[in-house]
Amino acid sequence: MTILIQNGEIVSDGQRYRADLLIEGEKIAQIGENLTAPEGARVIDASGKYIFPGFIDPHVHIHLPFMGTHAKDTHTTGSIAALMGGTTTFIEMLAPAGSEALKDGWKTWTEMAQGHSASDYSFHIGVTRWDDETEATLRELVAQGMKSFKVFLAYKGAFGIDDHALYQVCKLAAELGVVVTAHCENADLVSELQQKLLAEGKTGPEWHEPSRPEGVEAEGTAHFAAFLEMTGARGYVVHLSNARALAAALDAKARGVDLEVEVVIPHLLLDKTYAERPGVEGAKYVMSPPLRDKRNQQALWEALEKGQIDTVATDHCPFDVAQKHMGDDDFTRIPNGIPAIEDRVNLLYTYGVSRGHLSLERFVDAASTRAAQVFGLYPRKGTVSVGSDADLVVYDPHYRGTISAATSHVNNDYSGFEGFELDGRPELVTVRGEVAVEHGEFVGTVGRGQLLRRGM
Ligand code: URP
Ligand code: ZN
Ligand code: ZN
Ligand code: ZN
């Protein structure tokens, strides 16, 4: 298939310019002024629209097992939702239960994805225990291009690992040159505070945030940074949520620790008052790290614009209302997570670019290019360049709409962003040269999405 996109404004790699763009097969073949359409090419007029590189969500849970239940998406529903919102690649966390061998987890996760995704995808390899089998499998998977690990300093008794395992993971990552991504909350402190609050009869969702206050995350961030410093590993803090944790990350960077920082869309736009709503209405907004006091949002937006925060992801993790009811009598039993895979780009564009905190160039960088660079996908992904995959978003900044669960493609029955206004949406999305979304409809191919082997 040959496609000529005319008259759009390309925004990529810190630049904006008006040009035509020719797609041949799966790749971008030419970018230039007044390109002529080859015989048989489809011509698309992008006047008044932006052309962005396909967006990359580096932090997604499709099928996370959590508190005896599972996040509700499949690769089909999750990838269609992603594409509708302009995300053409996502990286999911492969999360074996602590009792499961990593090689079995790899088999389970890849079988769930293969042949079912409409967008491209990859995996961070979750390390939930340390033993010889884990180390051998990690070496094997890195050789196959799965060049990032994921660890939890939080979730004692579930995914969480101890400091011995953390040290071994970081040491191996330094040896193999892969990045360690980490959920940074001190698990023992969380557990102590949860027990204290429950003993005081404080059982509602409004106690989730006080059970893991800002200092718990700041400690986790500094703790992770110390392990990176001692081992020389590259690190990436996922879903950093508050100014104190940010200070800990920036302090480590200033010492020369090789550290990238991610923020997720719920922490930029929602605050802890959402989780203080009574009963299940609050439970819908329980995630970890928790939604914070609103004053943190200003610090996150500023650090994002300056590039002190590198990426904007979602931590997409859909649990439905019935699942959220599991914690009716005990906030520690609420499955953690807020879905956002479909809405991330539109929300970041609307509340970042359109309404004032973020330059258009930095928006593209944070939601696409940086993730490609950090996770070994650049320049195949994350840039509008000749020779790159033709993953493109023709974006309409004149569209006006609102978010609603009723029109969402995520397999869930509520949206954490219900009623949020949008100042734009993808008009057309391509995945490796195939049109996957057009005029707000999914028209792609389920099963065409590829497992991306990175840094190869
Ligand atoms: O609340 C969250 N974030 N749920 C998903 C698991 C995780 O911590 O990333
Ligand atoms: Zn997490
Ligand atoms: Zn510590
Ligand atoms: Zn997560």
Image: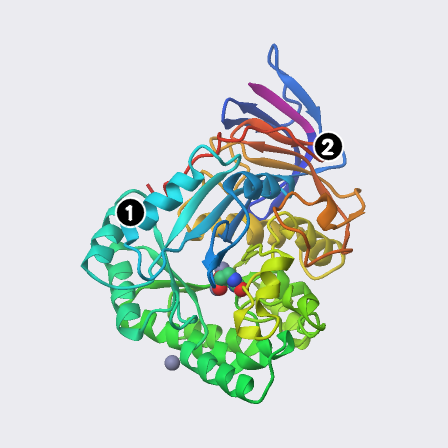
Q: Report whether the residue tagged 1 is closer than 8 Å to ligand 4.
A: no
Residue placed farthest to the left in the image?
132
Compared to residue 290, the image places residue 426 above or below, namely above
Q: How many other residues sit within 10 Å of disc 2, few (<14), some (14-19) or many (≥20)? A: few
Quadrant location of the N terminus in the rendered image: top right
Q: How many other residues sit within 10 Å of disc 1, few (<14), some (14-19) or many (≥20)? A: some
Answer whether residue 255 is magenta in the image: no
User: x, y percentage for residue 204?
Assistant: 63, 77
Compared to residue 229, the image places residue 439 above or below, namely above
Query: Mark 1: which amino acid?
Result: Leu
User: x, y percentage for residue 207?
Assistant: 60, 79
Q: Which mark is residue 439?
A: 2
Compared to residue 413, the image places residue 279 above or below, namely below
> What are the residue bounds of the magenta stretch?
1-6
Ligand 3 shown in quarter: bottom left
Answer whether residue 5 is magenta in the image: yes
Q: Residue at x 64, y 58 (%)?
A: 321
- Please name the predominant secondary structure of the magenta segment in the image: strand
Quadrant location of the C terminus in the rendered image: top left
Which quadrant of the structure image shows residue 237? Answer: bottom left
Q: Residue at x 71, y 73 (%)?
A: 278
Residue 426 visible? The answer is yes
User: Which residue is tagged 1?
Assistant: 141
